Image: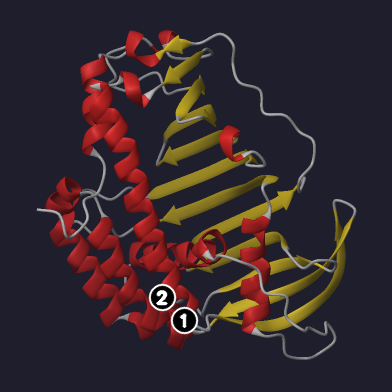
């Protein structure tokens, strides 16, 4: 089994973990004794889903991946010998006011493929169906046809209503919301029916950001994961962009079949999937998630931190910006915006 398949597998599982708290609705307050030797799967899932009840918070973390002697899926492509990725991010959400929902993200990514380095740093602010984008760092040799200096260190306004016909853009936004809601409901339904987690070990109490937490090592149940994967594959293919699925349908089916046929072997080779979870003692909610995995000479490390729950930080909207259609042709941007949405299966 190739390394790329193993990490694809872990990536799918990581998506499952994140989807649980992103998609679960409502918070159950279980009767829970922290000194019991066995903590229920429901408690873990409820602590994750409790994050969805917090309307204002900060999420920051990192993802680091190191691959060596990669075996690429495609026989037509040359494989790089070494790939290193380090991604840092800081994300703020402020959804206290339904009419003035805002979020802000800054991302720094450093990618090295063999001896070729690539770096990207961007800031994004979303508010009232528009996006403000600032590129702080960009590889100079990207084939964009535009000088890098014209794209960096200034704010751009990305307004869907100005990237094509107004009526088309409006219907596109609404259609996107409908599709996303339908997708989330289906994923939520199948995940909520699974008993995915079990607590492998209680590590002890720790204080994070002046908040008392309990630290656990949590594992995924292989039987439940094996039953869940084909259902997730079906939903992803159903809601994927139609044109992209036509281009990659064969590779997608090949990957799906390989993962399902070799599930037991993959699970054994990666020695299961564990992650560390820090849960606050008062009003249990996840404070921190950490995963570290090494396969052969390859490694994956990641961390998510949740803080500033309902605190008084302010997301400031840029006052000076350039409409992005002043840099890129509006018809080109509109084409991208309106052609990348998935179609529901019921549509012709």
When the figure is inspected, residue 299 is found, relative to residue 138, above or below; the finding is: below
In this rendering, position of residue 124 left or right of residue 141: right
| Image coords of residue 100 (percent x, y) | 59, 32
| Image coords of residue 11 (percent x, y) | 43, 62
In this rendering, position of residue 263 left or right of residue 56: left
Foreground residue among 283 and 41: 283
Q: How crowded is mark 1: few (under 14 residues within 10 Å), some or many (20 or more)?
A: few
Q: How is the image coloured?
A: secondary structure
Residue labelled with disc 1? 193
Q: Specify the quadrant that holds the N terminus.
A: bottom left
When the figure is inspected, residue 158 is found, relative to residue 329, above or below; the finding is: below
**In what element is the residue under mark 1?**
loop
Instruction: Report whether residue 195 is seen.
Output: yes
The residue positioned 44% from the left and 31% from the top of the image is 118
Instruction: Report whether residue 69 is seen.
Output: no
Task: Tell me whether circle 2 and circle 1 mark residues in contact (CB < 8 Å).
Answer: yes
**Quarter of the rendering containing residue 2:** bottom left
Q: Residue 190 carries which label?
A: 2
Foreground residue among 259 and 132: 132
**Quarter of the rendering containing residue 339:** top left
| Image coords of residue 279 (percent x, y) | 76, 67
The residue positioned 53% from the left and 75% from the top of the image is 273
Q: How crowded is mark 2: few (under 14 residues within 10 Å), some or many (20 or more)?
A: few
**In what element is the residue under mark 2?**
helix
Count the marks: how many? 2
When the figure is inspected, residue 245 is found, relative to residue 227, above or below; the finding is: above
Foreground residue among 29 and 153: 29
Q: Which mark is residue 148?
A: none
Mark pair 2, 1: CA separation: 5 Å
| Image coords of residue 176 (percent x, y) | 33, 44
| Residue at far bottom of view | 37
The residue positioned 24% from the left and 67% from the top of the image is 255
């Amino acid at each position: 089994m190739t390394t790329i398949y193993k990490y694809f597998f872990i990536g799918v599982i990581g998506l499952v973990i994140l989807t649980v708290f992103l998609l679960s609705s409502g918070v159950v307050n279980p009767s829970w004794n922290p000194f019991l030797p066995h903590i229920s799967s429901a408690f873990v899932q409820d602590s994750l889903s409790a994050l969805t009840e917090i309307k204002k918070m900060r999420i920051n973390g990192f993802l680091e991946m190191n691959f060596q002697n990669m075996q690429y899926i495609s026989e037509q492509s040359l494989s790089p010998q070494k790939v290193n990725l380090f991604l840092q991010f800081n994300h703020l959400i402020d959804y206290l006011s339904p009419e003035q929902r805002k979020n802000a993200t800054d991302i720094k990514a450093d990618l090295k493929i063999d001896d070729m380095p690539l770096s990207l740093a961007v800031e994004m602010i979303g508010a009232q169906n528009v996006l403000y984008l600032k590129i702080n760092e960009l590889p100079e040799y990207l084939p964009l046809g535009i000088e890098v200096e014209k794209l960096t260190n200034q704010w751009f306004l990305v307004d869907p209503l100005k990237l094509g016909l107004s009526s088309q853009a409006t219907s596109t936004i609404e259609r996107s919301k409908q599709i996303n809601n339908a997708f989330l409901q289906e994923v939520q339904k199948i995940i909520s029916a699974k008993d995915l987690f079990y607590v492998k070990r209680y590590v002890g109490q720790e204080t994070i950001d002046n908040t008392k937490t309990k630290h656990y090592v949590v594992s995924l149940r292989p039987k439940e994961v094996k039953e869940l994967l084909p259902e997730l594959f079906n939903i992803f293919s159903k809601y994927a962009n139609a044109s992209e699925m036509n281009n990659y349908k064969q590779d997608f089916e090949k990957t799906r079949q390989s993962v399902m046929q070799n599930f037991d072997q993959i699970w054994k080779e990666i020695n299961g999937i564990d992650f560390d979870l820090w849960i606050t003692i008062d009003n249990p909610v996840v404070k921190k998630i950490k995963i570290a995995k090494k396969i052969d000479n390859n490694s994956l490390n990641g961390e998510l931190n949740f803080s500033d729950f309902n605190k008084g930080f302010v997301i400031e909207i840029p006052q000076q910006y350039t409409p992005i259609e002043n840099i890129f042709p509006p018809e080109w941007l509109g084409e991208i915006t309106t052609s990348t949405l998935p179609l529901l299966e019921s549509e012709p």
